[in-house]
Image (cartoon, rainbow, N blue to C red):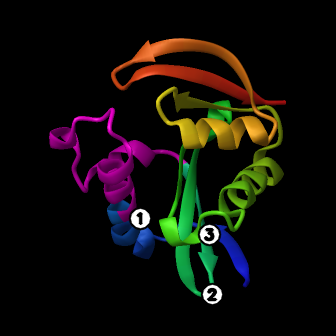
Amino acid sequence: MQIILRDYHITDKKYLALLFYQIQQEEFPWIDKNTLFLTDFERSTEGERIFVAEVNGKIAGFISVWTPDKFIHNLFVVKNFRHLHIGQALIEKVLLTFGKPLTLKCIAQNKTALQFYLSHGWIIQEDGICDEGTYYLMILE
């Protein structure tokens, strides 16, 4: 298995938009499904740096970063490629590119993501409330 990390290309847009939409539809019960659209990917990543992970020539996931704050806004991995360290590889790419500290918000109900971040050295800095519910502001120093 070979993981390739690369910059986003406009040709990735259609696939990543579908991935973004489907994962939210299937795995984010805290989001009202009637508010989700395929165009959300473009809106959610506007002005951000996006890196894509490929495994054996297939897109396995992506990460988007608001670079002025080194804030990870999105990290999505295709179900079939989970547990292959794709998420961690994408975070390491961001670390190599921008350095520490990195921050992100994790919705408290997203137990899988929360456990992933905590097990990889992220620390909860504070909590808050947003449209999607309680979230944790996390930092990797």
Q: Is residue 141 visible?
A: yes
Locate the N terminus by quadrant.
bottom right
Residue at numbered disc 2:
56
Q: Quadrant of the C terminus?
A: top right
Tell me what residue is drawn at x 38 percent, y 48 percent: 27
Gap between marks 1 and 3, in whole Å? Answer: 11 Å
**Front-most of 65 and 20?**
20
Tag 2's secondary structure? loop
Q: Residue 96 appears at what percent x and percent y?
A: 82, 53
**From the viewer's perspective, is residue 43 above or below residue 133?**
below
What stretch of residues is rendered in magenta? Answer: 19-48
Residue with the mark numbered 3: 53
Q: Is 45 a magenta residue?
A: yes
Assign a secondary structure to mark 1.
Answer: helix
- Tell me the residue at 58%/42% (across/down): 113
Which percent across, then down, holds residue 18?
A: 32, 64
Nearer the camera: disc 1 or disc 2: 2
Distance between the alpha carbons at the discs numbered 3 and 2: 10 Å
